[in-house]
Image: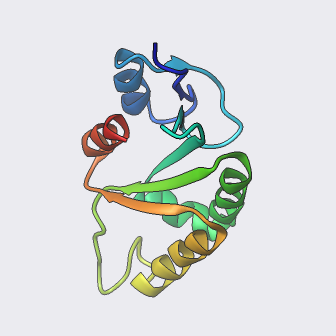
Amino acid sequence: MLSPRYVDPRGHTELRIALEQAGFQVKGLASGDVQFPEAGGGTVLVEYKDVYQVLTDMASGQLAKQCRRMVEEAEYALLMVGGPFDLINGQLMGKYTWDHLWDQLLSCQEYGVMLERTVDRPQAIHRILHL
C-alpha cells in the first residue's frame, strides 16, 4: 500500500484534480501544494508556481517566506516553476529583468529548496507523478 500522498485544496485546480484522480488525498498543507513520502522515508514538499506568480510573490516577499517554511517542514523541498518566461523589452511583467528573477531563485536554492522548471501545468503534473 502506498503511503499517504497529499494535495492542498487551495492550490491550482487543474493540479489538484489530476493528482486526486491519481490517488492523492486532499488535505490542507501548512506550506507547499503537494506532499508525499520519499523512498527513504523523508518527506517531499512541492510548491508549484506559474512564472508570473513567482514574480508577484518575489515582489511581496512571500516567495522567500514560503521557501524558508518548506525547508523547515520537509527533508526535500522543491519549487516547481511553470509557464512561459516571456520578455517584453528585456523585462518580465514590464518591470523585472532576468537578473531579478534569477537572484530570487538563487536565494531559494540557498535556503535549501531545489528548483525545477516546467513548461506548463500538464508537464508539472507529469513531473510530480514521476517523482
Q: As rendered, which of 92 and 111 lies closer to the eye? A: 111
Q: Residue at x 51, y 66 (%)?
A: 55
Determine whether 113 is above or below 69 in the image: below
Q: Position of residue 99 (x, y in %)?
A: 45, 87
Q: Residue at x 29, y 78 (%)?
A: 88
State the scheme by which the image is colored.
rainbow
Q: As rendered, which of 63 and 43 lies closer to the eye? A: 43
Q: As rendered, which of 117 and 37 lies closer to the eye? A: 37
Question: Is 118 placed left or right of 25 in the picture?
Answer: left
Q: How many marks?
A: 0
Question: Is 62 placed left or right of 119 in the picture?
Answer: right
Asked where in the image residue 37 lies, by quadrant, the reply is top right
Q: Position of residue 41 (x, y in %)?
A: 58, 37
Determine whether 121 is above or below 93 in the image: above
Asked where in the image residue 45 lies, by quadrant, the reply is top right
Q: Residue at x 56, y 71 (%)?
A: 109
Q: As rendered, which of 91 and 4 lies closer to the eye? A: 4
Image quadrant holding the C terminus, namely top left
Q: Residue at x 56, y 25 (%)?
A: 9
Determine whether 23 is above or below 69 in the image: above
Q: Position of residue 7 (x, y in %)?
A: 52, 28
Outermost residue toward the front in this view: 40
Q: Position of residue 59 (x, y in %)?
A: 61, 70
